[in-house]
Every structure is written in structure tokens, then in C-alpha cells.
Amino acid sequence: MRSLAADSKRTVTIAVLMLIAALSCGPQKPPTLTEPKPLTMIEKVRMADSFHHAGRMNDALELLAEVVTENPTNAQLYSLYGEYLFLAGRYPAAEEQLTLALKLDPHLTDARNWLGVCLAEQQRYDEARAQYERALEDPAYPSPQMIYLNLGMLYRAQGLDDKGIDQFRIAVQIDPRYLKAHFELASALETVGQLEEALDELAVAEADYRMDGTYWYRRGFLEFRLEREHKALEWLRRCIDVSPGSPAAAQARELMGVIQD
């Protein structure tokens, strides 16, 4: 018990000494608040990307506009801002930013590809094709398959399915793992009546579309057109399982009723 009492007295004494020492030093100044460091260009771009993925596109665009204003000679920033404006559906504004990017750097092929997409969306097909063709002149561009895909979709928008198919074939030859190109090739082949090959291309694209009910409906419908009803039913049931309340599921149920009558 004595030792415990001694320890208690020692603790109190130390506390009192600390209090006296603190008081003898006079009043304490509050800690100085430091201003937060301004965000760097890279940090702002990353934040804009986070806003975009969080569905806050207006915030992303506002931040990118600020970054572009602060860095008026950076062509890649104009290009990025143009891409985001395009994704927001602001096509004339996107075109303006992408054009500014190319004025600063005519060899910025990614901006040229996006400009082609922007022009195509505005149904200015000849101008869009000119941008794609010029982009394909860049031997150093790492993803020419993307340009061929866009060119193929441009031709299809004009009703030129055979030309579209040619471009899609080039895209998948360059990158056999480019599943979107396989998917678009399947759509074009279906339109011109090449159903077996269309099914083959859809099968290749499955990894990217297996959670899409419309994808499974299309496979089922193609099997139905080829009079393979057992396989058609399998894919139509998959469509309903994947997206039971979707328009594709409603179409699948209707087609299943036709097959099973």
C-alpha cells in the first residue's frame, strides 16, 4: 500500500510541476495556420477524372476549364478538355477545344481521332473521314485499330455497310482482342446477311458483353434465323437471366413464345 501511495504522490507532483512550468512561460501563442498548397496541374486532372467517374461531369468540366486557362500552351490539356466536352454531349464546344489542340500540335493524333468522332456525331461525314484518314498517316500512333473502328462506324452511318466491314476487319486484324470491333463487325455482317460469321464474331466479343441482355438476344435471334431453335432458346433464356426487366428480355420472351408454339 505504501508504494502505491508514494507513486500517487509522485504523479501529482509531476503534474503540478508541469503546470507551473507552463504558466511560467507566459501565454501560449496559437499555432500558425499554413495555407494549403494549391493543386498541381496533374492533381487537378486526376480530380477531374474522379469527378467524371463519380457522375459529376459539370464539376469535371469546370476544373478542366480552369486547368486549360492556367496552361494555355498545353495541347494535350485542350485535347482532354475536348474529349470530356464530347462525352457531355457538347459537340460544338468539344470541336473548338480539339481544333485548338491541333493548332498547338498538329501531330497530336489522339485529338485528331476525337475530332473525327465529334464531326461524325454532327453528321459532317466528309470532314470526319478526312480527320480519320489523316490520323491514319501517323505511323507512330499506338492504337490505329481505334481509328479503323471509327471509320467503319462512319461508313455504316452512311449506309455503306460493305466499306464498314472492311474497316472493322482491319481493326480486328491489328488487335484480335479488340472486342468492340468484333461486336461492330458482327452487327455489320448481320445487316448484309452473313449470319454464320456474324455469330462467330459475337461469340468472340462475349467477354465484354456477357452482362448485356441485348447481346444475348441478338445471339438468340441469329440462331433463330438460322433455324437452330434449341440454341436460340438457350441464348434467349440467358438474356432474361441477365436483364429480366429490360426491353431485350421482353423481346426474348416474345420470340420464345413464337419458337415454342
Image (cartoon, rainbow, N blue to C red):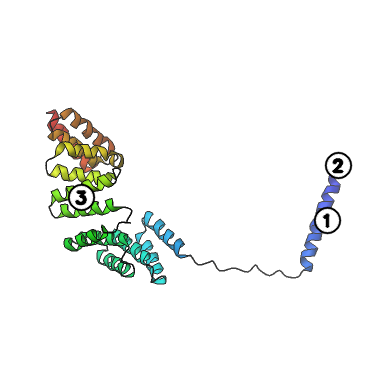
**Crowdedness of circle 2 by 10 Å Cα count: few (<14), some, many (20+)?**
few
Identified at 28% across, 37% down, the residue is 242
Label 2 amino acid? Answer: Met
Closest to the camera, between mark 3 and mark 1, is 3
Determine whether the residue tagged by mark 3 lies in a helix, strand or loop: helix
Q: CA distance from mark 2 to mark 3?
A: 93 Å
Report the residue marked by disc 3. 167
Say which of 30 and 239 sits in front: 239
Identified at 22% across, 30% down, the residue is 234
Q: Mark 3 or mark 1: which comes first in sequence?
A: 1
Report the residue marked by disc 2. 1
The C terminus lies in which quarter of the figure?
A: top left
Residue 158 at what x, y percent from top left? Answer: 13, 55
In the image: residue 117, left or right of residue 54: left
Determine whether the residue tagged by mark 2 lies in a helix, strand or loop: loop
Say which of 7 and 173 sits in front: 173
Q: CA distance from mark 2 to mark 1?
A: 19 Å
Residue 64 at what x, y percent from top left? Answer: 38, 65
On screen, residue 232 above or below 65: above
In the image: residue 197, left or right of residue 17: left
Report the residue marked by disc 1. 13
Mark 2 touching mark 3, by CB under 8 A? no
Identified at 34% across, 69% down, the residue is 104
The N terminus lies in which quarter of the figure?
A: top right
Q: Is residue 249 visible?
A: no
On screen, residue 113 above or below 235: below
In the displayed orientation, state which residue is furthest to the front.
139
Q: CA distance from mark 3 to mark 1?
A: 87 Å
Say which of 66 and 28 sits in front: 66
Identified at 68% across, 70% down, the residue is 29
